[in-house]
Image (spheres, rainbow, N blue to C red):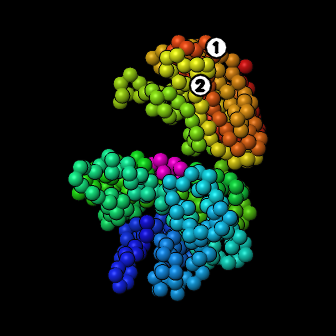
């Protein structure tokens, strides 16, 4: 997304205003309204620079061939748009894209957040703001349906025989997109750089997931030439981007001041998993708080005996003749050494059509099992326990069919509940069954 899209011409390059560049500026500037004082006052002093810097990755995309106006105005542009990868500094626009892996986005965000804080602590606040603008651009890219969408898939789904269309442009540059006025209170992402980077990238992953869900309605509207309808979905995402930017601005200032305001606890339901395995009857995905029912449009809540409640439903592979073991898992990346305790519950969903066998639940840290339940049937109820994550970087919820001979398919519907990471190790709950 860019404020000034550069269009090659036989004689010169023209600059035309781009709605997506406006959106980048909205995200960066409007986030300041969601900050408490004195944080808001600090960033408000540099609002115009922050809004401009949010477009640096596009303005200077052509390097030395960029607009002379901007090359003269920002002679230090290279410091911000070049990012490290493979041991060298490269033009970093592609490193901010939602198609990048979690590890790649973590590397880019980690570098930028470190540079912001270093500049703030050295009193070079304008340079800090410019680096922050690159982070804002990263947020905007992950919230842009045109960047989240796979162009090849768009063509396969929406392009008719005999037609040829570049869908990216109408998705990205819709002049009817507007900033959605709303209220929000910024939240601190973490108590140190490592935790902040982890939570920021997690926010981007959730944003990408939400943006993905807008692709089909936006495309359907575009194919009807109804750009007003398409703009409704795009505008909502601009609002979500702004909220994340507010969180980032608040956190950067808190870290600059040395204050610890990170959340006391984080639910796994707030995070996007880094890996998982589930049966095709669950669309090969862990299910959040509901699972597929007999009718396609009537999902089933999750209830292991304490009433319907939020959680994660997993379904081990159910294909007939499957060799031992039949298992399913969902794995999350967590910051090492930040959380002292992980609470959870587990059991089989009593509202499912049938539970024909029992399941053995496990918690794994960095691939090693650290907690295991006895075989739990549908009558066992919800079992609660806690473990200490220590310095683990990967937390996995795992479940398997308790049988040793599993060639015959027997259905069961395991769930995890109340999966919460805590910063404090106080008041460890006692397991119900162990």
> In the picture, residue 231 is in which quadrant?
bottom left
Residue shown at the point (40%, 73%) measured from the top left: 5
Residue at (46% x, 56% y) in the render: 143
Residue under numbered circle 1: 404
Q: Position of residue 92 (x, y in %)?
A: 56, 67
- Please name the residue shown 52% across and 66% down the image: 93
Dominant SS in magenta: helix
Q: Is residue 269 above or below residue 352?
A: below
Quadrant of the rendering where the C terminus is positioned: top right
**Residue 318 in sight here:** yes
Is disc 2 in contact with disc 1, using a CB cutoff of under 8 Å? no
Earlier in the chain: of badge 2 and badge 1, it is 2
Magenta stretch: give its range: 203-210
- What x and y, as percent, mark residue 320? 49, 17
Residue pictured at 71% horizontal, 38% vertical: 366
Q: Which of the pair 339/64 is nearer the observer? A: 64
């Amino acid at each position: 997304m860019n404020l000034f899209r550069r269009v090659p011409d036989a004689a010169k390059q023209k600059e035309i205003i781009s709605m997506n560049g406006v959106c980048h500026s909205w995200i960066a500037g409007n986030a300041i309204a969601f900050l408490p004082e004195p944080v808001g006052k600090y960033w408000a002093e540099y609002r115009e620079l922050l809004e401009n810097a949010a477009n640096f990755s596009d303005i200077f995309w052509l390097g030395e061939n960029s607009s002379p106006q901007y090359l003269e105005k920002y002679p230090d542009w290279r410091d911000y748009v070049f990012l490290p990868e493979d041991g060298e500094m490269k033009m970093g626009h592609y490193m901010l894209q939602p198609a990048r892996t979690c590890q790649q986005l973590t590397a880019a965000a980690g570098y930028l957040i470190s540079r912001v804080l270093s500049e703030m602590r050295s009193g070079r606040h304008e340079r800090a703001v410019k680096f922050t603008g690159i982070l804002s651009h990263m947020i905007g890219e992950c919230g842009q349906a045109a960047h989240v969408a796979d162009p090849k898939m768009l063509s396969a789904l929406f392009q008719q025989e005999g037609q040829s269309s570049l869908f990216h442009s109408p998705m990205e540059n819709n002049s009817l997109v507007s900033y959605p006025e709303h209220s929000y209170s910024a939240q601190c992402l973490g108590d140190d750089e490592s935790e902040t980077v982890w939570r920021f990238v997690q926010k981007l992953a959730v944003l990408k997931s939400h943006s993905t869900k807008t692709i089909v309605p936006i495309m359907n509207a575009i194919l009807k030439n109804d750009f007003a309808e398409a703009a409704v979905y795009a505008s909502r995402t601009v609002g979500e981007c702004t909220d994340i930017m507010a969180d980032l601005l608040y956190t950067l200032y808190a870290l600059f001041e040395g204050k610890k305001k990170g959340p006391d606890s984080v639910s796994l339901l707030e995070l996007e998993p880094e890996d998982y395995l589930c049966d095709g009857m669950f669309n090969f995905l862990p299910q959040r708080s509901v699972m597929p029912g007999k009718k396609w449009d009537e999902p089933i809540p999750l209830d292991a005996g304490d009433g319907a409640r939020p959680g994660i439903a997993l379904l081990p592979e159910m294909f007939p003749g499957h060799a031992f073991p039949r298992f399913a898992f969902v794995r999350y990346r967590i910051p090492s050494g930040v959380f002292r305790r992980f609470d959870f519950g587990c059991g089989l969903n009593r509202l499912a059509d049938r539970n024909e066998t029992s399941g053995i639940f496990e918690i794994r840290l960095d691939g090693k099992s650290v907690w295991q339940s006895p075989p739990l049937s549908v009558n066992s109820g919800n079992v609660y326990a806690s473990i200490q994550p220590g310095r683990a970087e990967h937390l996995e919820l795992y479940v398997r069919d308790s049988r040793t001979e599993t060639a015959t398919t027997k259905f069961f519907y395991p769930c995890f509940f109340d999966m919460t990471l805590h910063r404090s190790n106080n008041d460890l709950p006692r397991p119900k069954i162990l």
